[in-house]
Amino acid sequence: MTTNVKIALAADRVDLPLINTEDKNRRLFTPGEIVTSQQGFMRGHGTYMEDDSIKSSVAGVMVQVNKLITVKALKGRYVGEIGDVVVARVTEVQEKRWKVDTNSRLDSVLLLSSVNLPGGELRRRGAEDEKQMRKYLQEGDLISAEVQNVHSDGVLSLHTRSLKYGKLAQGILVKVFPSLIRRRKTHFHNLPCGASIILGNNGFIWISPILNREGEESGGFTQNLADVVTQEDRETVARLKNCILGLAHCKMMLYDTSILYAYEESMKYEVQELLQPESMAIVAFNTQQRLQLLMPFVSPVRLTGSGGPIESSAMEGILVFDQTNDLIYHNFNEAMREKMHKQALDLGLLEEETVCPTQDLNSNVLIQIFSPLLASQRIMMCQFDNAYTSIQMENNLNVVFDEFLGYVFLEISTKDIDLIKRELGAFIAFIKYICGPNIFIIKNDTSKRATLTELIDTYRELYATNQGVLMEAIEQMLVNVDVKNTVVAALQAATDRLKQDPHSQRSHSILFVGSKFLALYSSRQAQELAAVDLLFLNLLCQSASRRPQRRRIESQIVFLQGSIHQSHAGCVPHIVHVVQLFEHVSLVLLIEHAHTALASHLYDVYFALHKLQNLQLQFDLDNLRGGFDALDTFVKHTGEALRKVKSNVAEVDEATRGFTSKWENLRRKYTDYFRTSDNGLIVKIDSNMPLFVESVKELFRLLCASCPTLEHGLQRVTDIADMAEDSLSEVWSMVDFARTYLDKGYMSMIWKDVTFSYAYFLWFEDEHGTALKPNEPPNHQHHGASGLPATKPSLMAGILAGDYYHRLIETCFPRSPSGKIRCYELFLVHLGLVTSTVVLEHCRRLAVTITDLTGCIGNPIDLL
């Protein structure tokens, strides 16, 4: 004789009174107790007036809506309202009506005129239909219906005119107190576990497997009793029933989310074990802990100002969890940080005296806050392959989920869900560019974390102000052919200078002006870039320019996508040098630093590993062979690429040997499993899989994610930046040169250097636009100069430190009113060598064009 004995520790015991804390702040009124003695209130259900006071007629809690006070009974019969969804049982067939039990004080009525005829036929009901009533519905049948009307005596009138209502087929009926059913917009739910559930407002809950609804064309009167319910579906329905009974036993509200959470928490028990009080309590307790994660976000936060209610500041936060649910990255704005501190205090994870709202929460605290939601996401992802995509709260706070290589990305924001999904997608793209497939590195690398945070902040800011980021396109700056050729020639010179380094044979040189792309030059062997790579590099430049203290040259390793037309794409390691030449002008120098084929094959190994691990978690053994074959192919390609890599570093050789040996060990176990189908080998495979994963990460880190020569070419990059800035200095030096000769009396001059041709002109016009010739001083002929003698003003050229040009007008036109004479000056720069005739002609055309565009100049002096 054997007896099952269950032993549980006292520390594991859960007290049932501690579970239901939803109404802990609501007072319980007993029959005859005074609810309020204040005047001006109206009494509602569950109350009566006596001695000018409103008293409770039932045992329950008070519910106040404006001036209306009702007492909601904790236990009692169902009190129906119009629009309620109910599950009912037919008790009697009468003349032109059915009497049904809806768990209310009186039987409800379903009129023959309130049901759909077979086939959905629309016509008046006649005597023939009345004779067929028992054929449609008979005593004992279960139906789903909607409350159409509530009569004065409390009798409910039902209808089933929608095809979603009608006779219920195969399933289980569960009865609970009506007060435990939470009112929602919909009470019909198809749960991801493979069952359908109808939550009747009357406390009757119908659970059934999801079957083909072939009877919909029969007006909802077909039961489909011929459909076979599998053993798996029967266990699912039975488990849901026991979960609902457990939640009801612990007085927890019943709705789709609470039932689904309870189902997930019950998976560690057998179905029959859920009938034990201890198991019920543990499942209910764990369900409540997961629901508490959503509770802080349900209550809207509103501030009141002089103009009325004001919405609280927008909350934004991003979190990244690895495969073990460890938090590796989080970024909150100030409003979300305060919300998380408040939530941690409410859950008892922090002590009030230790709270500092301006500091980030400890990762362990955040893990405890989000672990219920994350556990649910993992279960939905691994067991049902139907993960959450978003959760929408009542106060416009939304949660969006995404997944990449087993890492869960979660963003919380008050923005629209579609916009949050776009932001989270951009964030995942940024983290792939910064970390490649080895995302875990973001946890300990502070520089990469800072870069990632700057990128997402820049993206959010530019999304609202820049049309290129809004459309996710890179704008090209249009310039004339001469300027374009000169810029490309300069980029070619920079690329050729990089090629002098043996480690920089494959490179690109790119020039950005603000958010616009100006030019690109690539070496012959370089991997072609994708359009999204240029967009990312532009965002990288703009995020670097927004730093309060930025270095002249920013260098790091990124993993570009590359063109899909190339043989190897998806993960191309590059060293990127961002050079801020001057305001809003950035020079980007890209250098391929690793073996492209090796990086691409390792990237494929990461994806194949993730797919294989998912198949094992889902216990999908039918597709396991295909996943293994894909991984085996990518590992072979990686081995071939490793043999082509020449490395004299002992650490790399050791990592290569470890990668090969661990894969051979894992491969033998998979081969044995496919030959014997012994499920015990799956356990051995799972225990050896982490060792192989670590060897892949180490190999990628050494050969792709790290570069000992990162600083090697920095001096050459500095030389290129100096050369570009020297060109700008040459252009700006023309101003000082022209002003020096202006002080000597020269108002027109042309000069050249190796790269540019410069010109400066100063002239005078009257108020009608007629050119004026300055008066020549008497000694002009004696000087023999082609320009005017020096006016020798005591002021420097300009207008801030004193109006130099006004003094110049007074000197050149001593007898004319200075207010009627205007002075203009024009600076010209030409690329390359041009003749003086061309310069003069360009000057005339440019002056006329500016006048035509601007019209009559209203200021006495205008600098062009």
Image (tube, rainbow, N blue to C red):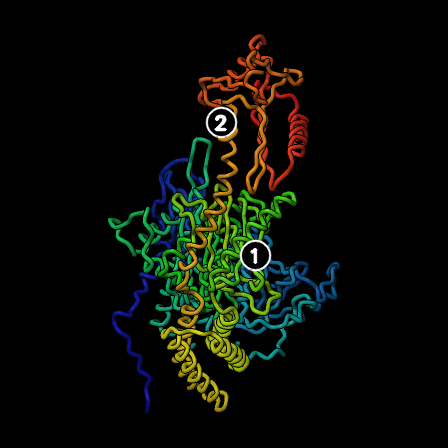
Question: Looking at the picture, does residue 20 appear above or below residue 382?
Answer: above
The residue to which callout 1 is attached is: 532
The percent coordinates of residue 83 (x first, y second) are 57, 54
- Which residue appears at 43% of the width and 69% of the height? 703
The three-letter amino acid code for the residue at tag 2 is Thr
Classify mark 1: residues with Cα within 10 Å, few (<14), some (14-19) or many (20+). some
Front residue (pair 608, 727): 727
Q: Quadrant of the N terminus?
A: bottom left
Q: Quadrant of the C terminus?
A: top right
The secondary structure type at the circle numbered 2 is helix
The residue to which callout 2 is attached is: 740
The secondary structure type at the circle numbered 1 is helix
Q: Name the image quarter holding residue 49.
A: top left
Whether residue 598 appears in this view of the structure is yes
Front residue (pair 181, 547): 547
Front residue (pair 361, 785): 785
Side of 550 where 518 appears, left or right: right
The percent coordinates of residue 748 (x first, y second) are 59, 26
Classify mark 2: residues with Cα within 10 Å, few (<14), some (14-19) or many (20+). some
Q: Nearer the N terminus, badge 2 or badge 1?
A: 1
